[in-house]
Image (cartoon, grey):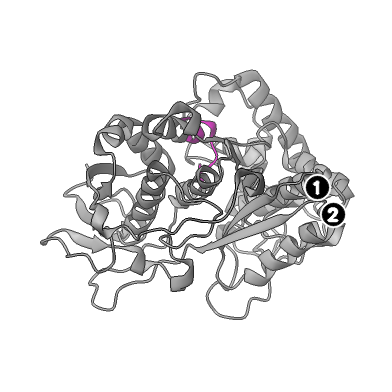
């Protein structure tokens, strides 16, 4: 059981009247970003439709509620019961989409969610001015751009496509790693054959001064925030598809053992997650032709194959090594970060294997190496779990052991991606100076 729910109500505007206790008010004021970049300001060449505004509002409310509900207060120090109220322009449409939304949220956060919708007060909506742009000036493509290897590889490929219309990249700032994101973006910009536009937003939620709660450190719902923001941009400029690049290994995220629910923490780009996100969009879009589809263009590629694609798109090795892939970057929040990668988490291990596959070496400076025999066992838990997993056969049943696949999935093709990725990881193990075994 997950106990009594924590109640959060998203305000239509930061100055809107707060709800009565025990409801806790949440609003855009929680996000650490300048007023000029607030969601109610125009950043695109056309206004977004109401349904896309609603989707972004719901995603921002979910992420804020996620951060403002501590897992430490629950019976198992993990599973929470969150009840969230959000104002939307079409409550009936969102009620139809609710089963898909709750399934998505349960999948990505592991919590119990109850989301309810109330009518949005149109008087709170900022009045937009007509914008002097025509369809010929809209972006042609929209993609997420995190500054990681996968998003860099996709951006590099698409930037070299000659087009009269822009590629719009949506970025969420990683605090203390903005310079990393800027470096890899500038590398794409230097080789681009077309106009590039970059839209940046904050994912940092701050604790209100008078709050009695502590912020939750995990951020499992961030993938919905990223994708919804990209969909909002695409809907504004009439782009029918949003690309969320993630190699098939990490997107599928098969568990390394029966005791682990997934090899790494995120299921943001899992086929099951994208399936339900697309069903939500279909339910809330005003007309079918307005719907935006979210796809993973690298779903059939391993990390090594993504690295090879980035290299073949013209990026030098040092730019690929300058990307940010770590799941738990060291020294976060201390202002000075000597290393961008811990070197020990599963995303770092996959990164190592991908660069090794493409270049025969990985010159990335890591904080530690998992095969270092002087490290305590706790710090090498991912490495030891990986070694066990590579010694164990992987079947289609393993792909659905903790997360289902959507009806249109092709399990055999997905398993083939995992197997090729396992071969890349075995090559990493074979190159390790000292293979630290299971104990």
Question: Image check: 113 left or right of 247?
Answer: left
Q: Is residue 388 above or below residue 364?
A: above
Which stretch did the figure color magenta? 266-275
The residues bearing labels 1 and 2 have C-alpha atoms spaced at a distance of: 6 Å
Q: Residue 43's x, y, as percent? A: 53, 59
Q: Is residue 239 above or below residue 186?
A: above
Task: Look at the image and tell me whether residue 10 can be seen.
Answer: no
Residue 404's disc number: none
Residue of label 1: 310
Q: Residue 44's x, y, as percent? A: 54, 55
Residue of label 2: 315
| CB under 8 Å between discs 1 and 2 | yes
Task: Look at the image and tell me whether residue 98 can be seen.
Answer: yes
Q: Residue 205's x, y, as percent? A: 40, 66
Q: Which quadrant holds residue 331?
A: bottom right
Identity of the residue drawn at 57% across and 38% down: 253
SS for callout 2: loop
Identity of the residue drawn at 53% across and 49% down: 233
Query: Badge 2: few (under 14), some or many (20 or more) residues near its Cα, within 10 Å?
Result: many
Query: Badge 1: few (under 14), some or many (20 or more) residues near its Cα, within 10 Å?
Result: many
Q: Residue 267's x, y, as percent? A: 50, 42
């Amino acid at each position: 059981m997950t106990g009594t729910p924590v109640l959060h109500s998203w305000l239509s505007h930061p100055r809107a009247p707060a709800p009565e206790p025990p409801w806790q008010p949440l609003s855009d004021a929680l996000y650490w970003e300048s007023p000029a970049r607030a969601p109610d300001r125009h950043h695109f060449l056309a206004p977004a439709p109401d349904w896309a505004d609603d989707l972004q509002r719901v995603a921002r409310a979910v992420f804020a509620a996620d951060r403002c509900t501590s897992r430490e207060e629950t019976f198992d120090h993990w599973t929470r019961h969150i009840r969230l109220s959000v104002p939307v322009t079409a409550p009936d449409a969102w009620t139809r989409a609710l089963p898909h939304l709750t399934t998505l949220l349960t999948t990505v956060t592991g919590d119990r969610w109850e989301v309810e919708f109330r009518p949005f007060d149109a008087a709170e909506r900022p009045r937009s001015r007509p914008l002097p742009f025509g369809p010929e000036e809209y972006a042609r493509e929209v993609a997420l751009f995190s500054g990681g290897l996968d998003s860099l590889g996709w951006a590099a490929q698409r930037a070299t496509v000659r087009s009269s219309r822009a590629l719009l990249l949506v970025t969420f700032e990683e605090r203390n790693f903005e310079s990393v994101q800027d470096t890899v973006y500038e590398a794409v910009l230097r080789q681009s054959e077309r106009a590039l536009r970059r839209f940046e937003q904050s994912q940092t939620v701050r604790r209100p001064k008078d709050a009695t709660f502590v912020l939750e450190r995990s951020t499992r719902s961030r993938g919905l925030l990223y994708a919804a923001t990209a969909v909002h941009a695409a809907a504004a400029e009439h782009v029918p598809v949003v690309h969320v690049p993630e190699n098939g290994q990490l997107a599928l995220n098969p568990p390394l053992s029966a005791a682990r629910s997934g090899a790494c923490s995120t299921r943001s780009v899992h086929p099951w997650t994208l399936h339900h996100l697309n069903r939500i969009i279909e339910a809330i879009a005003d007309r079918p032709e307005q719907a935006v589809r979210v796809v993973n263009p690298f779903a059939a590629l391993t990390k090594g194959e993504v690295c090879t694609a980035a290299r073949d798109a013209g990026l030098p090795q040092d730019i690929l090594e300058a990307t940010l892939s770590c799941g738990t970057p060291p020294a976060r929040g201390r202002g000075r970060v000597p290393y961008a990668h811990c070197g020990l988490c599963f995303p770092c291990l996959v990164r190592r294997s991908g660069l090794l596959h493409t270049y025969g070496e990985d010159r990335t400076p890591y904080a530690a190496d998992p095969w270092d025999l002087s490290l305590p066992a706790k710090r090498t838990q991912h490495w030891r779990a990986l070694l066990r997993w590579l010694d164990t056969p992987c079947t289609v049943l393993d792909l659905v052991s903790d997360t289902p696949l959507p009806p249109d999935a092709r399990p055999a093709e997905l398993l083939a991606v995992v197997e090729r990725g396992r071969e890349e990881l075995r090559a990493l193990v074979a190159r390790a100076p000292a293979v630290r075994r299971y104990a």
